[in-house]
Amino acid sequence: MIAFQVKAEAQWCCEQCRRPCRCPGESVEDFLKRCQPWQRSFTPVEYQAAPRRWLLTVAHLDQRPENCERENLKALCVGCHLRHDRQFRNKQQHLKREWFGQMNWLVLDER
């Protein structure tokens, strides 16, 4: 319910890059018409080749899913959401490797 509200408030466009995204139940034809002001050359073939690129998601800006305060949520297309999360994923990956001892060889090689 909260995610739908965030997306509707963003008018089903990414709040980062302004890419229009397809609404649930919206026909491909209606979606393509809505995309015309954004990208005149957008075609059904482009949409069908990668429909997930036109999916709107909701990001937790602080990376805490339990924090559903409106100011912590942002409607992002899949690409922008991945870019937003990248910095956090890299840090988590490093910490996980460190935790499981996979980073120890780096320390030993430096001695």
Image: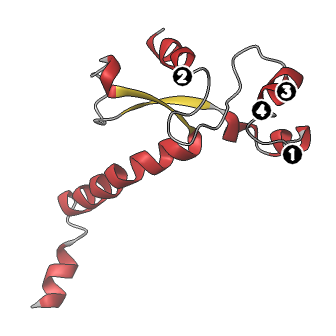
Q: Which residue is mark 2?
A: 10
Q: Secondary structure at mark 1?
A: loop
Q: Which residue is mark 4?
A: 35
Q: Check the image and report above or below for 56 versus 40.
A: above
Gap in Å between the C-alphas at discs 4 and 3? 5 Å
Of residue 95 and residue 76, the one placed in the foreground of this image is: 76
Q: Residues within 10 Å of mark 3 (few under 14, many from 20)?
A: some
Q: Residues within 10 Å of mark 4 (few under 14, many from 20)?
A: some
Say what amino acid the circle numbered 1 marks.
Answer: Ser
Q: Which residue is mark 3?
A: 33
What numbered label is drawn on residue 41?
Answer: 1
Of residue 54 and residue 41, the one placed in the foreground of this image is: 41
The image quarter in which residue 45 lies: top right
Mark nearer the N terminus (4 vs 1): 4
Gap in Å between the C-alphas at discs 4 and 2? 15 Å
Say what amino acid the circle numbered 2 marks.
Answer: Ala
Point out residue 61 in the picture as x, y percentages from the top left corner. 33, 35
Q: Residues within 10 Å of mark 1 (few under 14, many from 20)?
A: few
The image quarter in which residue 14 lies: top right
Say what amino acid the circle numbered 3 marks.
Answer: Lys
